[in-house]
Amino acid sequence: SGKIDVLEMVGMLLYMGFDSSLEQVHEIIIQSDVDGNSELDFQEFLHVMATHELNHTKVLRQAFKRICSSADTCTQEQVSDLLQSLGYFPGEEIFHETLMADGMQDTEEFDFTMLRAVTGQCRRHLAKVARGNAYFPEIQIHLMRKLFQEQLLSGSAENIERGGLVCLLQTLGVPMNTLQERDAILHMLEEARASATASGAARQDGSNSASIAFPVVLHLLRAIASHGQMTVMRRELKAMKDAQVSHAEVVEFRQVFNQLAIEAKTEVAEKEAQAAAALAASPGGRRRSMPDLSAMARPRRGIENDAVFQELKASLFIGGRALCISVGTVIGMLRSLGVRISEKQLLELTNKVRDFAAVDQG
């Protein structure tokens, strides 16, 4: 079409090592989507890249002035501190390798141009690492590795089998009940292998396609999340158009909404865990002679209450579903802000929610 949508733009920024997320989609639209069609043509794309580079340079220069005080240069130690403060520090070993590659290993004073060059190299290294990790944050990768290790058939195994993958995906809420759902995942699995190999995170090994390495699982989950994100974004843009809400207003409300949704989801998970524990402990609960065959595909007790687990599940946009909050939560939030809501307005709000839900299901 000669244009790219905003999610594709975010993906490109991530690939280049810039910190971008779905939450920044609307910011990009506000700044660059001149014709208002929620897609970027080549001129708008150039505007995004120029704006991003200018903002990055501005932040870097401000940090440089702050850390160097009145001087025009900073020491190697100060460069290290600055990179850490901006989230671009790759670790001591890589940092010194970067300096050596640029012939700066013995440099004692760094001006802004030199700092910018070192920052660019470190950012590109971190971007490569992020691509290998399928852009998941470290805290979520740690959790996923634990879930992955629980599916290993032996202590010496490095890969899981397809059965283990099914259990892992079901733990994260990925539907795997029908043949169609499983076929769709297997199709994405082959793409995930190619993506993990291209990123350098996994070696190419077609000898055992039933064996799945951890990096491949990460890239599979990223593919699932990307598909869901596209669905969410299209639905959100349609809702914005129908409700006549501006991108700027979306940016203002998103942070509050996300916080409410995470709190509500955690509260529901806690209640479900308590109910399950009460059922198991009751005399009329599951007979002890009957094993719970769904236990393998269900989060172990406690993890469903974990905030990181809930954030991970939300970030996967399973089935194109974003974070949700109830009408009651919305009403409570509005009333806490002093907004009066009549019975008529409450009915209108409820009907509007049902209308949007009907569109989602259709």
Image: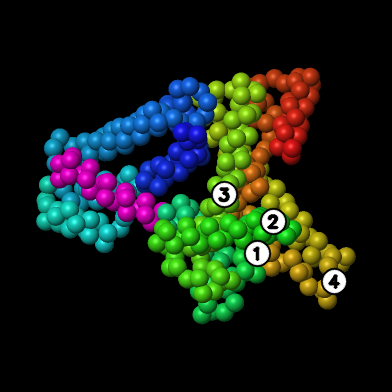
Q: Which mark is residue 181?
A: 2
Distance between the alpha carbons at the discs numbered 4 and 2 = 32 Å
* Residue 257 location (% of width, % of height): 59, 35
Q: Secondary structure at mark 4?
A: loop
* Mark 1 lies on residue: 166
Disc 3 marks which amino acid?
Answer: Ala
Task: Answer above or below: position of 186 versus 161.
Answer: above
Main secondary structure type of the part rendered in magenta: helix
Asked if the stretch drawn in magenta spans residue 128, the answer is yes
Mark 2 or mark 3, which is nearer the start of the sequence?
A: 2
Label 1, label 3: how many angstroms apart (C-alpha)? Answer: 16 Å
Q: Is residue 26 magenta?
A: no
Q: Gap in Å between the C-alphas at discs 3 and 2?
A: 15 Å
Characterize the local packing of mark 3: few (<14), some (14-19) or many (20 or more) Cα atoms within 10 angstroms: many
Q: Residue at horizontal 47%, vertical 54%? A: 134
As helix, strand or loop, the secondary structure at mark 1 comes to: helix
> Which mark is first along the chain, 1 or 4?
1
Labelled pair 1, 3 in contact (Cβ < 8 Å)? no
Chain part drawn in magenta: 110-130
Q: Residue 238 appears in which quarter of the rendering?
A: top right
Extreme-right residue of the structure: 284
Asked if the residue under mark 2 is in contact with the one under mark 4, i.e. CB atoms within 8 Å, the reply is: no
**Residue ID for mark 3:** 225
- Residue lying at 79% horizontally and 19% vertically, measured from the top left: 344
